[in-house]
Amino acid sequence: MKQVIIIADKQTVQFFTLLGATGFVTPTQAPTTSTVDPAINYIRSNAQSIAGVLVHAQLADLIRERMNRMKEIVIPIISLPDSSGASQVGFLETLMEKAVGMKLEQGNFLQKNQKE
């Protein structure tokens, strides 16, 4: 079975590992190549069994740069928005609407129906 890799801060990695991902905790403030090397080496060694890589937004450019050097490995890299990434919420909502085929409204459905 293919695995998903998560490269992010400790809290994000803990959440995704509960869902079955393989995680690598990396400082998101001022990341360097040496902080992401363990994850990159793991990806290089296990490329055939990796379905995708989820990356904290602040690490995305660095990870993409390192992955682009490995021309023989093609794995999707998905950038996860951080808590300051509120501007991406609208974009994600649009994608979800297209995938689901309907617009999902916020709010508590039960409370709305109980008032009627």
Image (spheres, helix red, strand yellow):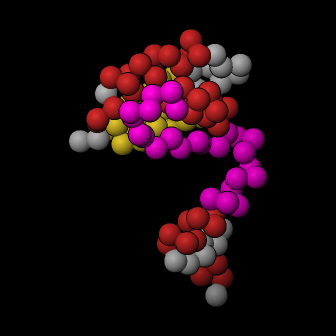
Q: Quadrant of the N terminus?
A: top left
Which residue is at a point 52% across and 32% down the rendered structure image? Answer: 68
From the top left corner, tell me how far across and down residue 32 is, in percent.
63, 16
Point out the residue furthest to the left here.
1
Which residue is at a point 56% across and 12% down the rendered structure image? Answer: 34
**In the figure, is residue 61 to the left or right of 13?**
right
Mark yes or no: residue 18 visible. no
Count how many numbered circles sit on residues in the image. Answer: 0
**In the figure, is residue 67 to the left or right of 62?**
left
Region in magenta: 68-92
From the top left corner, tell me how far across and down residue 79 is, in percent.
58, 42
Query: Is 62 above or below relative to 113?
Result: above
In-front residue for pair 44/19: 44
Q: Quadrant of the C terminus?
A: bottom right
Query: Is 28 above or below relative to 93?
Result: above
Which residue is at a point 28% across and 36% down the rendered structure image? Answer: 49
Query: Per the image, is 89 magenta?
Result: yes
Point out the residue furthest to the front here.
71
In-front residue for pair 29/106: 29
Which residue is at a point 59% across and 16% down the rendered structure image? Answer: 33
**In the figure, is residue 43 to the left or right of 93?**
left
